[in-house]
Image (cartoon, rainbow, N blue to C red):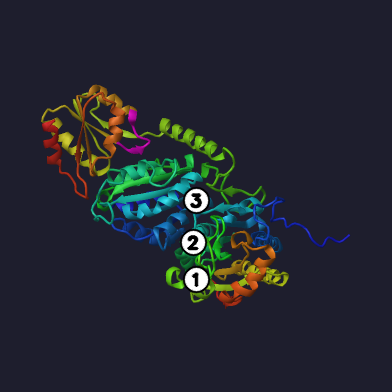
Amino acid sequence: MKGNIAVCEGAIAAGCTTYFGYPITPQNEIPAYMSKKMVELGRVFVQAESELAAINMVFGAAVSGSRAMTSSSSPGISLKQEGISYLAGAELPCVIVNVQRGGPGLGNISGSQADYFQATKGGGHGDYRLIVLAPYSVKEMYDLTFLAFDLADNYRIPVMILTDGIVGQMMEPVEINPEFRVQSSEIKKDWKLDGCKGREPRLMRSLIMEEGGLEKHNWHLKKKYDGIKKTEIRCEANFPDSAEITVVAFGIAARICKSAVKKLRQEGLKVGLMRPVTLWPFPEKAISDIAAKSKKILVAEMNMGQMVEDVKLAVNGKCPVEFLGAPGGAVFSEDEIIAKIKKL
Amino acid sequence: MKKVFSKPESLQDKNNSYCPGCGHGTIHRIIAEVIDELGVREKTIGIAPVGCAVFAYYYWNFDVTEAAHGRPPAVATGIKRCLSDRVVFTYQGDGDLAAIGTAEIIHAANRGENITTIFVNNANYGMTGGQMAPTTILGQKTTTTPNGRDAKRDGYPLKVCELLSSLDGVCYIERVSVSTPKNVLRTKKAIKKAFENQLNNCGFSLVEVLSQCPTDWQMTPVESVKWVDEVLSKTFPLGVYKENTEQTRK
């Protein structure tokens, strides 16, 4: 299965009933596949006139209580930021897939990790967070998309799948976990708008003009975000207890680093890998613990250095943090990583 | 005793925030009356715009969501595609619909979304203090056209009914006003038809209502209704621009 198709299958299995999209490379398999599959299943597919329209259609679908998804790639995700801020403000659950490409501007169409800041630090206006999941395999494209819908509903929060053109286009066998169960039927959306039959009318908004009202609302959001930080951090650590040098990487970069680390271990070098699966909430404590045991940390990302800032905050001076970058849609090779680690 | 006038159930018993002489209150009430008469209050979802009427959700007594500036037709599309048996309408001003949301309204109309749009044209941005709107008429003074709208610098007033009536997905388009009791009755008839079309699954309906904004026009309420009749409706002639109720969405 191709990575982009795994996203679709994960979404469909999770009970995604509405998809709204707009064409952009390298995620075009998603709207194409959804246009066929969703119709076959009697679910909703609309090709919107723009990314703005697509994210606002998601807003409408989420308001009505439906599980909704949109997908795009970097320049298109920039256009969606207005809508994402409104979704976060109104606490509407949805799933947004960013199959990243090189930037800034129109950039290029090869895989990139340059939207880390945009995804984890806001992107739109105002104080808010998204849950950001970073798959590193086709299987995880399926699994994390599936998980994203439950997280979104549980916390009334937009969830972003931050992947890239390489994972999106990659083909791998996917074994589907039969244990996966959709929680949607258990989550009561007592806030949705579906007509006020038998109840008081409801209101959905992010405009809070009452004296002190917005401050109160934002403290409520903060409390929710703090709760998510306590329970939803996901990461994978390889050889955390015996590594002198630990590589920290996410997504496709982690995939390349993982095989580099494996080769170096075979040579007898004490290296390890820490892979954040949730980029927000960020696995600060796990990285801090590793830093306490490591001599050095290497952050490898396909950008000019973005996650490295969060790693440095987590490490907080416990050990030196080095950086290996590949901006502009470039990918580093396993050999480059091996050479860099050997030089440390 | 026979009751001849009362507050519609679809309107909450509240004072509104609109200026004296503003048309929004009248238009809100007309919508509430129509929803009551059609018996659809409990299955209606309204979409409030950005602008003065953002607070519409405090005045109507049914489910209402806010939307980003210009995006109500996209939000309405999302809701209606999920809940096709509900009544979904957008309430939008001229800045919202005819400037920042031009793409959304054209494409929702062109897809023939089975929704209703009430488009309030008061020829300026009211909430932000009276700037030029896409529907500001030539020569009209606003805070951003201090010498009057000049076609050479500012372009021409955008005629939404004329523009949208050329689209195949559109079922019904009419321009009305709330300047006189007769026009108010005409507006109610048009709005009712626009909602009935949705119930009959006919596709996209839009009613443009020419409305007064005495505060930003710097007129008295009486002068402002006169200006709608004598000046504004010359650029924006009242009437039915398209009616194709035979059309049923497949």
Q: Judge whether residue A158 is colored magenta.
A: no
Residue A6 in view (yes/no): yes
Q: Which mark is residue A62?
A: 3
The lab-note entry on whether marks 2 and 3 share a chain reads no
For mark 1, what is the residue? B158
Say which label, 1 or 2, has the lower sequence index: 2
Residue A15 located left or right of residue A235? right
At horizontal 26% and vertical 53% (from top left) the residue drawn is: A169
Q: Nearer the viewer, mark 1 or mark 2?
A: 2
Q: Which residues are magenta?
A: A276-284
Name the residue nearer the viewer: A201 or A272: A201
Residue type highlighted by circle 2:
Thr
Depth check: give the residue in front, B228 or A152.
B228
Task: Please tell me whether mark 2 or mark 3 is closer to you in this view.
Answer: 2
| Mark 3 nearby-residue class (10 Å; few <14, some 14–19, many ≥20) | many
Query: How far apart, in angstroms, are the residues tagged by discs 2 and 3?
Result: 38 Å
Quarter of the figure with residue B175: bottom right
Q: Residue A27: horizontal and vertical position, in percent?
A: 31, 56
Please say whether residue A1 is visible from this viewpoint: no
Q: Nearer the viewer, residue A239 or A298?
A: A298
Does residue B175 sit above or below B30 in this rendering? below
| The disc label shown at residue B144, or none | 2
